[in-house]
Amino acid sequence: MAAAHEPNARADAASVLDYDAIIIGAGISGMYQLYRLRELGMRVRVFEAGTGVGGTWYWNRYPGARFDSESYSYGYSFSPELLQEWSWSEHFAGQPETLRYLNYVADKFDLRRDMQFRSRVVAAHYRESARSWEVTLHDGSRHRARFLITAIGPLSAPTLPRVEGVDSFAGQSFHTAKWPHEPVSFVGKRVAVIGTGATGVQTIAEVAKTAGHLTVFQRTPNWCKPLHNGPIDAQTQVRIKANYPEMFKRCQETFACFIHTPDPRGTFEVTPQEREAFLEKLYATPGFGMWQGNFRDMLTDREANAVVSEFVARKIRERVKDQKVADKLIPKDHGFGTRRVPMETKYYEVYNQPNVLLVDIKETPIARITPKGIETSAADYEFDIIIFATGFDAITGSFDRIDIRGLGGLRLKDKWASGPQTLLGVQVEAFPNMFMLVGPHTALGNIPRSIEYNVEWVTGLVRYMRERNLTCADARPDAVEAWTDYVKAMGTGLLSNEVNSWMTGVNSNVEGKQTRIIARYSGSAPAYRAWCDAVAVKGYQELALA
Ligand SMILES: Cc1cc2nc3c(=O)[nH]c(=O)nc-3n(C[C@H](O)[C@H](O)[C@H](O)COP(=O)(O)OP(=O)(O)OC[C@H]3O[C@@H](n4cnc5c(N)ncnc54)[C@H](O)[C@@H]3O)c2cc1C
């Protein structure tokens, strides 16, 4: 347990610390960071709000939850033994399988003994005199460590819509990211789904299979693309396991760590026939290829983007029988790929079912949620179940929910009031010894690939400090400025930065998040790693080390 008093001298500091490092979160990031810090012989504690490991895959148990990354490209790459032991059953595994996988990893590496579940961190304050962090849990207990590592997830702070009566519904209601551990039956039930983002699209396609009646409340349609999932047969399994080194090497080389990467050709450098054939091929290819592997100018050139958008719009019109409904499902305010592209399995066909209704809440906004159901400006709907597929306060949301204070009591939330500023997405100036995994302005993409890199970089820094008896690492302001400028430069010219989405920091369900910011790093993953590697190789001159 933590000492109640502030130590007087730094020399005493180590003796009163409970741990060398505290990690917040037991998802993919927290699990791997624990593994690596243990190798350095450190005393580490992981505090996790949930009752088990897995993060995203622990919380998001909603029907239809599954990968958009190819399963084998998503799993950890650090252990060849693990890679050979684990066999993914599908090209895009469902949530139960991924959660089983992460539990298997936790067992294999005996991770749970340093983890404390049901432990939500409510505050983390830097103690300058002791060069350490004091972390407070929701039960009031306090714990001290030299290093604080946040592994709290870019998509882990769920949000509800800001409408009157949101808590008043008398039937069953669920947020997709707080789904119960017990099965929920929709058979014969009147079900509402609010939200048509990546999660909503997966949920809707699954719920429509059994619901008595399904009403979908859509504010912003998204450009969705068929996932084309399927089982992995024995022969393919052998091939996948034999090819892991090459596959991960490819993920290191591609723009966003996926197995897909942009085609070097420009949209208008090929004949219309070649273009059409290429787009058909991408539409029929499993996974994110249509988004991540399209013509190189698809996300920067308005006309190129319009060609792809029109292609997908045509597909929607072909798949949905009622053309008025099809029209509502076709996005008008953004082009294909400029927001996160939901992957779907027979999503559009759902709207051909007689028991499914699409309500456009831009036309007829939700006025309130009532004990019986949902009232829009045009009608009252009664339901047995309401599902909120309303997503997350992304990227900075999980930070905002913790009272994080650095030097002089500076609040992180205040520091980031007009948008995050970081060094490499890992450090924030005036928050010494705090390292963020998958923090704002880090490379994302196929996220576990970025997580492994982040973890290894942080581990390298910690090792460097311990070898030299250094106890304090703070980001230098000029280095933060340089990185922030680079992040901004990388976003220049991207069509996605002209669109409201969690990627531009806009969330109408969250107060104060109505203005676009540069919320994420949108350069390539190799460029990100090159910058980070250079900082390490030159002895971390971008950090003030003491
Ligand atoms: C439905 C869904 C599907 C996705 N599919 C893909 C995909 O196909 N490919 C891809 O690359 N990415 C995908 N992602 C992104 C996914 O979040 C990352 O791939 C990855 O799981 C992030 O891991 P993490 O450990 O960094 O964060 P998380 O998995 O979010 O884990 C963070 C953990 O921190 C805990 N935590 C947060 N705050 C606190 C606190 N204050 N105190 C204690 N504990 C706290 C949370 O409870 C959680 O367990 C998906 C996300 C969602 C929501």
Image (cartoon, rainbow, N blue to C red):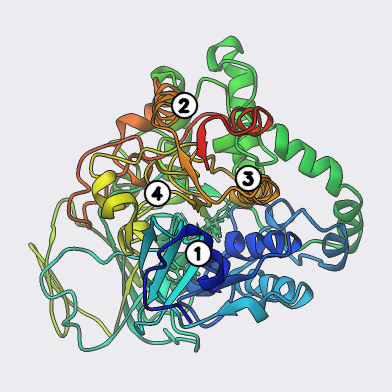
In the rendered view, tell whether residue 264 sits above or below residue 161.
above
Horizontally, residue 67 falls left or right of residue 5, namely right
Residue 399: percent from left, percent from top: 36, 57
How far separated are the C-alphas under marks 4 and 3?
16 Å
Mark 1 sits near ligand 1, with its Cβ under 8 Å away: no
Residue at mark 2 to residue at mark 4: CA–CA distance: 35 Å
Where is residue 14 drawn, in percent x and y? 55, 65
Label 1 neighbourhood size at 10 Å, few (<14), some (14-19), many (20+)? some
Callout 1 amino acid: Ala
Position of residue 214 measured from the top left corner of the image (x, y, whole percent)? 34, 73
> Mark 3 near ligand 1 (CB under 8 Å)?
no
Q: Please, what is the three-letter code of the amino acid marked with disc 2?
A: Leu
The residue that disc 1 covers is 13
Q: CA distance from mark 2 to mark 1?
A: 51 Å
Disc number placed over residue 431 in the picture, else none: 4
> What amino acid is at disc 3?
Leu
Q: Give the structural element (helix, strand or loop) at label 3.
A: helix
Q: Nearer the viewer, mark 2 or mark 1?
A: 1
Say whether marks 4 and 3 touch (CB < 8 Å): no
Dot 4 or dot 3: first in sequence order is 4
Q: What residue does disc 3 label?
A: 461
Q: Is residue 387 above or below residue 171?
A: above
Measuring 61% from the left and 51% from the top, which residue is drawn there?
451
* Residue at x 41% of width, y 76% of height: 120
Q: Is mark 4 within 8 Å of ligand 1?
A: no
Quadrant position of residue 42 = bottom right
* Residue in the foreground of this view, choosing between 395 and 114: 114
How far apart marks 3 and 2 lie (CA) works out to 35 Å
Q: Position of residue 533 (x, y in %)?
A: 66, 32
Q: Which residue is mark 2?
A: 299
Instruction: Rate crowding at label 4 as few (under 14), some (14 to 19) or many (20 or more) other CA atoms within 10 Å.
Output: many
